[in-house]
Image: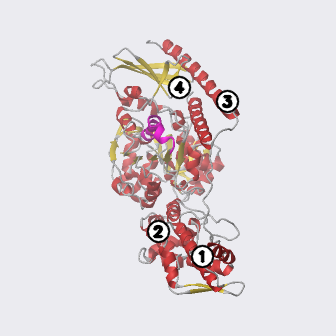
Amino acid sequence: MGSIEDEQVFMDDAYDTLEHHIAYLDSRVARLRAAPSVGTVQDELERQAQFENLMHQLKAARQSGARLCFGRIDTSAHDSYHIGRIGLRDTDGDPVLLDWRAPNAAGFYQATTVNPMGVTRRRRIITKDRTVTHVEDELLADPTFTSSDTDAAAAAVEAPREGRMGDIIATIAADQDAIVRSPLAQITVVEGGPGTGKTVVALHRAAWLLYTFRDKLAKDGVLVIGPSTAFLHYIEQVLPSLGETDVVLLTPGQLFPGITATRSDPMATAAIKGDLRMTAVIAAAVEHRRRIPAHDVAITLDDGSTISMTSRQLADARKSVPKQSSFHAGRDQFLTRALDFLARDRCRRRSEDPSDEDNRRDALADIIDDPAVRRTLNHMWLPISPERLVHLLLTDPATLKQAARGILTAAEQRALTAVNESDWSVDDVPLLDEAAHVLGDYVPPRPRWSAESDDGMSELSVSDPAANVLTTTVAERALEDREWIYGHVVVDEAQELSTMAWHCVARRSSRRSMTIVGDLQQTTHPAGARDWDEALRDIGGTVDLHTLTVTYRITKQTAATAVEWLTRAGGQAPLLQPIREGEPADLITCAEPHLPSSIRAFVGDAEGRACVVLPDHSYLRLARQLRGASHDFGSGDNALDSPIAVLTARETKGLEFDTVIVVDPVAISEQAARGSDIYVACTRATKRLALVTLVTP
């Protein structure tokens, strides 16, 4: 088989097989849904598992239609395998398409003339829709043939951007594929400059792990953490195109269930919120809500009678709480013990035998709803939600001063309480997570008293466990559960995580199976880690570090411009090997009123997507001006769906565009430490870069 026509025959057969496969899965799902619910709880759980498995297969099959097959390998054993997004078999059970993640497919990515891995020929198959347009052969058995991973990758970069991450499955280089297929039980760290394929590796690795270790990961799922919602929007179709659908995608601002934080704090405030010392501040704030007196306590009830506890009994109730208990779990145990002491005292005052269980039960029923009892005991161990606790620390200087004594300086405390915003910031999320961890769950059995009131009138009784709700997918269950531990965690743009954010991530990855990609040179967070050892100290485990240096995205000219601005701002030039030639950056000067027309003139009729990068301090004003001038400009959630996206430098992290226009590069180079923002902004361009200087008209 050596022609486009022959490959087209195969492609037609493969799509027919896919359609039959989808129809078969549809019918099985329909039968399962129509079947009556019978049997035991175990039967229902097995039925649910079967349903989830079928839905996973169905989603993967439906998502695989674009470029279903993209390659083929011929082996020295005279076997041929077509490589595709998913594995397919015909009605007789014979293999038609080999899943790219299967062990036999590794040669498609890793074979070279030096180490052919039994592969004699590698063929890349290029299609448009379902039509084969080109085939490209590499004869690995020929010692005079020199294969290159960079050709396919460079060609992929030359293709126009479409607002989503492009089709990358067929262009993985050998060194990248070796990282993709590295062991599950380790922390794989991939560092490298812009355009070196870090994100490509991370997403392929997530898909490969889910395929290879399905039994281990299906129950716990995979979490992918990206720097922004724009970035997640950008990559959201990649994992389905690789054959995976049940992956949780979150930003650092979404790691606490129910909250989506996007606001950034001023640098001084972010530096403190991201500091690991905040764990001690939160622990102290929680401890101050335990106010158990060292003296005897007497309580006058509504009926005028009195009950009491001795200081020794109070101490005994406190000691009954295990040291490792969370605040609210300990509260339940403390209250149980304290109420028992009070019930016994009630019995004695009634001349009843306190050792009799019925007597104690009657006495407890008499006192448990008494307002004075509730008030007195609640003041000893005040319940509170994580949100309320963090809010008090960030808005009430007195609360913060009490908790931060000996931990934060007065200036640091002022910086924390100086930001007067009603919504949560991204750096608040790790604080909420830490508070929730220390506090533990608190679910009042009846809602008539607030669990957060400091007036001592909240409900006393021991919390009831929340009901377990069986939801449709692992991803849905994981999103609802703050304590969910994932089978594998991927962190992209990892250099942007603060120390506290890493502390938060560590709770979700205690199995120590992670893929971490980033470029410490691009960090902009004032509390970011200086090296990977610092970032991962809370996680532990085996660390396997890889460095990628070949950049497929940016041209040599764009790289030179980015490095020039970076070093001018005090940054250190990274190790980069651009493989593509391009045009020098355009320098544009215009007055602010003419900015929209100048940008549109530069973009012109060029193919692909464009992006305007604005300084932080003037973003709102200039973005409004651009949107008002033309519907071509888009910002916020609609940015990547517009012909010309309007973003800040930080919002562009992990993204790429054919054309990038950097407005006021001087301001952008000064807004982050060591010029990291200007470096990020310039290196988003795959083809054309312009730097716009605004002048007074």
Mark-to-mark CA distance, 1 and 4: 67 Å
Of the numbered discs 2 and 1, the one sitting upstream in the chain is 2
Q: Quadrant of residue 171?
A: top left
Q: Amino acid at mark 2?
A: Pro
Label 3, on which residue?
Answer: 31
Quarter that holds the N terminus: top left
On screen, 94 above or below 684?
above
Tell me, yes or no, whether the two marked residues, 3 and 1, touch with CB atoms within 8 Å: no
Mark-to-mark CA distance, 3 and 1: 55 Å
Q: Amino acid at mark 1?
A: Leu
Give the colour scheme shown: secondary structure
Q: Nearer the viewer, residue 587 or 306?
A: 306
Of the numbered discs 4 and 3, the one sitting upstream in the chain is 3
Of the numbered discs 4 and 2, the one sitting upstream in the chain is 4
Label 1, on which residue?
Answer: 339
Q: Residues within 10 Å of mark 2 (few under 14, many from 20)?
A: few
Q: Amino acid at mark 3?
A: Arg
Q: Residues within 10 Å of mark 3 (few under 14, many from 20)?
A: few
Camera-nearest label, 2 or 3: 2
Label 2, on which residue?
Answer: 322
Quarter that holds the C terminus: bottom right
Tell me, yes or no, whether the two marked residues, 2 and 3, touch with CB atoms within 8 Å: no
Q: Is residue 218 magenta?
A: yes
Mark-to-mark CA distance, 2 and 1: 18 Å
Q: Which mark is residue 532?
A: none
